[in-house]
Amino acid sequence: MPDEARQHDPDTARPSATRYSLTLNETARLFAEAGLPRNSRSLQRYCAAGRLDCIKEETATGLTFFVDPASVERAITQLAQLHGITDEVRQGAAEPDMSPSVAPAIEPNAKFDQPRPSAVERDTVAQEIPERPTSPQSDMSRYVAQVESENAMLKEHVAFLREQSQVKDTQIAALLERDRETNYLVRGLQHMLAPLLGRGGEPTLPTPLAHHEAADERMSDEEKDIGIGA
């Protein structure tokens, strides 16, 4: 059985005689009579923050909050000062109205006359308001923005690679042109050195057939010399 259900149970047994004699239901009734209604969750937060002096004790129905009445009066006085409610107004609201009926007075605009809430009240209101779930449209907008950013990065990468390819093509063309110029200079140098070396042109190497014919002629000459000597 949760704590909140036990706190709303009117049959909850009170602890031993201590100064913590009020249950959360009785504390909430005192706040409502003072014109400052608070639910059980708000009172539990007041206990956790130290605004209300309370304890948690084990009872027949489980753990239950018990509050010091003096701290309740002190908290009501502080909240009344924050909201601009005087003691006379609170007592007049609690007493029955015996005066003859009169025309209702025009209430001041709460937008301008209500005092500014304190930091504790703002934190309490912020905790009570649930967070709004994000809409699918905002999620889709973030997804589209992410995809567009990735596409832009890919386009920049492709452009960079294309520029690198163009630079490499230019360097290769320059190397080929330099190689052609080198070959042209070497051929020109060979033609210039040929007359200085006493040859009309480039030297030609003997073919294998001419080499064998020259060897046969030398062998026949040697045989003739041997015959003459004999």
Image: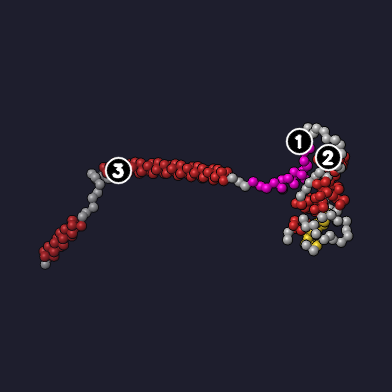
Inspect the image, locate mark 2, and give the three-letter code of the amino acid beneath it: Ile
Q: Residue 124 placed where, x, y %?
A: 75, 46
Label 2 sits on residue: 85
Q: Give, as a single range, the part of the protein colored magenta.
A: 111-132
Q: Let me know if residue 171 is in the magenta part.
A: no
Q: Secondary structure at mark 2?
A: loop
Dot placed on the residue nearer the N-terminal end, 1 or 2? 2
Q: Residue at x 84, y 60 (%)?
A: 14
Q: Residue 174 placed where, x, y %?
A: 38, 41
3 and 1 marks in contact (CB < 8 Å): no
Residue 189 visible? The answer is: no
Q: Quadrant of the C terminus?
A: bottom left
Inspect the image, locate mark 3, and give the three-letter code of the amino acid beneath it: Arg
- Extreme residue in the front direction: 100
Viewer-nearest residue: 137 or 217: 137
Label 3 sits on residue: 187
Inspect the image, locate mark 1, and give the three-letter code of the amino acid beneath it: Ala
Callout in the foreground (3, 2) = 2
Q: Secondary structure at mark 1?
A: helix
Q: Let me know if residue 127 is in the magenta part.
A: yes
Q: Residue 138 placed where, x, y %?
A: 57, 43
Query: How far separated are the C-alphas under marks 3 and 1?
Result: 105 Å
Viewer-nearest residue: 209 or 12: 12
Q: Quadrant of the N terminus?
A: bottom right
- Residue 9 numbered mark, or none: none
Query: How far separated are the C-alphas under marks 1 and 2?
Result: 14 Å
Callout in the foreground (3, 1) = 1
Q: Secondary structure at mark 3?
A: helix
Label 1 sits on residue: 110
